[in-house]
Amino acid sequence: MSSHLQRRPHVDSDTCFVLKPLTSACLLALATIATPSSAQEATDAPEAEKLEQVIVTGTRASLQQSLMLKRNSAVVQDSISATELGRFPDNNVADSLSHITGVSISRTAGGEGQRVSIRGLGPDYTITTFNGRLLGTDSAGRYFAYDVLPADVINGADVVKSTQAQLIEGAIGGLVNLRSASPFEQKGQRGLLRVEADRNQMSDLNGKKLSGTYSNTFGDTIGVLLGVVYAKRDVRTDTAGNDGGWSRNAVPSDPSQFWEFGNTWGGAIDPNGNGILDANEEGLVGPGQFRFGSIMEKKERLAVSGKVEWRPNRDLKVVVDGFKTRLDSPQVGYQLSFYPLYAPGRWSNMQVTNGVVTDLTLSSTDPELRLNPEVLNKTEYRVVDTAMYGANAEWKISPTLKLTGDIYESTSKRNSGGNDTYVVLRMNQPNVTRIRLTGAAVPDVTTTFADGRDLQSGLAQGLFSGSDFNTHFYSRTGDNIDDNIRGATVDGEWKLDRFNVERLRFGLSQTNRKKSRDMINNAFNAGQDHYSGASAINVGSLGGNVINQTLSPGKFLSGVSGNFPRSFLGFDVNSYAQALKAFDGQPRPGGGVYSSTLSAPAFNPLESYRVSEKTTAGFVQADLAGDNWSADVGVRLVHTKTSAQAWDAKINDIVENGAFNFTAVYADPSVVKQDASYTYALPSFNFTYSFTDTLQLRLGAAKTMARPSVDRLAPSSTTASISWGDFTQIYGGNANLKPYTARQADVSLEWYYAKNSALTFAVYQKNIRNQITNEWLTGQDIGAPGGRLFNVQRPINGDSAKARGMEIGLQHLFDNGFGVRAQYTRNLSSSWVNGVERPLEGIAPATASLGLLYERGPWSMSTTADYTDSFVTATNVIGAGWNETAKSMTWLTAQMAYEVNKSLRISIEGNNLTDAEQAPSLSNGTISLPNGYYRYGRSITLGASWKF
């Protein structure tokens, strides 16, 4: 027996989950087909051709396959697999990944999984590939947004937590490789047609989905596979937040605590009204802005995928595959917002509790100082086209030498320029408002107008109309993202089978990535302030159809206690823009004439960039094996050239339109270019030892890297905050930022104590250098007129960071049809910036998952609870030690299916059955302030599938 088989004695026919007996070698090939360390080994043995007879069905079979992939991998990894062709365990790939040990996800509107974090490290530390190829993304950075890809497009996914020289670089947290099916996995003609309908408790409309998968093989030579998915879903997300943040006084007695001037816009909060910042007022916190409302989203997906395999003989295989998806997902947020920002004489009857102003009244007769409630339309127009096309050829030149070549192109495009909105209509009626902080996500708000109307009851009864509002902030924005990746690889494999060296692997690759962002908005041309201040127009004079909705969503913010309006007004921005055109040419009190053209979105060079990367990589890796052990050692050499272009524009003038309302006038933009390059050698080592047929130890050590987010490489900047009186310059990036690097080690002990069952334990440590964070500088002279000093934010490389933790995983499938799977991950992390320790942002200290299943005869049932512990999302938000923290959350799903016959299957699935909410808070360890709220609601999906 060759050493290749000696090092895996635990694979035997008892672990087989197929419908007919297979040899051990066949099982081995099946288990390694999608494993990065051994994907090429599977085709070496003649028995591997029997893989074509495998038919995988059922949830239990899927779990068995995933466990076998883990057991036979050369690295620390976990996997998920489709229960059969075209039937993935969850509707969303990210949701399926959240069941895996060490994986957590973040959610977008509607509660759908979008970003993936591994072992607590955030999405920027993770890369996603499709059949080993980098995926383009519409995000400003590198992380892949999983909501663009329907689960029906893939057949499995591997989460690789350690690494090998042969694996693509760029991940410190881990690598997620999505896999598509092969038509030869199930020979002959096969197909699946599935229809679904879903209902969300917070949406008035139902969702629907239609998907189909077809595969066929023609002899042993040609195989084809086609898939199509169409889905449409309407969802609602209730939200509350603090866009303007919290106001805080300076701390002159300890300037290191906060900015020199604090961040209050109208002067230091002064409860005793003596005009002096007293010692007991230093660091005093008060509300800056808060808002609440609902986001209505209409999400539509269309995806097509295909694969053609040509196998003219046993020595040659050519595969051409690809997919194309469109996500059409506009989100319209209708919200009510309040700006109770402090200014001398604006607040009265203040009460201070534990350093926070918790009760205040605004009753000024000055229109600029009274509270003016606002109606807000906040739209995110997201239409994304994602595609991947590639060709792969595998040629066995001789019994000992094999070459593999791959070329591909991956693209992602989003055209949102000018279609996103932050448009505000401001109430213009005298009122008295009292605001009380209760600790809930929304304060108690009581507003009584001079004419006797009450805001809360008046909104519910439709007592307010356009004449009660003036035009105000008119932001039309959005970016156009174009991400293009082209890659080519040539890998070789030379069999040796001598001196414990099983084979040598080697290869070269080149990846060219070009990413551009064109910001289209009306900030640079001052169009967002065109209808504000002295130039405001009474909305009633625009016609009666501008404010055209009164929204009272059912059970709106039902999880938030307190006394505040639970009805709000809505308007359509495009109709509003049409109404504004009627004023074109009329004199503008602020100067000139009204012009819808001058206020329209245009190219904003300050927030646009062009970034290109050219990466050349080569690797050599030796695979070793002996009695009861296997190992690999290798090095990957990476050289990257980066070129970044952005624009800069000096500020010529700052025009004050009114309280907290300014317009910046810019000079003509100039081009800023930066070039950089870096070279890294990334060694890796993996070792697996089998104590018995059921117990094995896995060790791994490597140096890894993660490149800076693409937008962090562009030297762009913005001073848009001038518009609302916050004089801050924010730099988007710097091409000279260094990549993150990490020296990491993994130890994993795996006990496969029973058939299809395992208990695993792993510990890991990652010593990270050059992690990217932000620094804040205050009182900076950036050359603005009038000698105004600015706060400056810029990305920098931190000193170092450390992430370490442990994982426990359990899977047990009973013979009676029941099964359980559970996992727990504990992460400990910290970072240092300029010698000061702070939390490493975005790392959940603990994640856990518990799943129960039953599958016997025609019945299949399962329920899974995924838990994410609270974690720090941003540090030093309003001073040293004031960190934003996301609270812990448990996401509960359940599924039940019944096979009517061999062709027809019906199912029901519930998501977020506990109605989980996200509610981040801002705290310094003593004081805790609400800092957001998101509620997605429960949803139920009914489905039926027919296969042939």
Image (cartoon, helix red, strand yellow):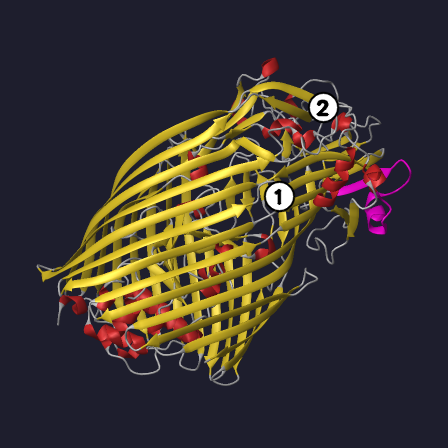
> Can residue 751 be seen here?
no
Residue occupied by mark 1: 419
In the rendered view of the protein, which quadrant contains the N terminus?
bottom left
Task: Out of 16 and 508, give the one closest to the viewer.
Answer: 508
Residue 640, quarter of the rendered image: top left
Q: Disc 2 vs disc 1: Cβ atoms closer than 8 Å?
A: no
Segment colored magenta: 444-465
Query: Residue 911 location, x and y as percent?
Result: 57, 64
Query: Residue 759 location, x and y as percent?
Result: 35, 66
Q: Amino acid at mark 1?
A: Asn
Q: Amino acid at mark 2?
A: Asn
Q: Is residue 664 left or right of residue 639?
A: right
Q: Is residue 453 magenta?
A: yes
Task: Out of 86 and 660, give the one closest to the viewer.
Answer: 86
Residue 47: numbered disc: none
Which class describes the residues within 10 Å of circle 2: few (<14), some (14-19), or many (20+)? some
Question: Of tags 2 and 1, which is closer to the observer?
Answer: 1
Q: Is residue 407 left or right of residue 373?
A: left
Q: Is residue 687 left or right of residue 813?
A: left
Residue occupied by mark 2: 657
For the point 55% across and 57% down, which residue is it? 112
Query: Residue 628 location, x and y as percent?
Result: 18, 66
Q: Is residue 780 left or right of residue 177?
A: right
Query: Under tag 2, what secondary structure?
Result: strand
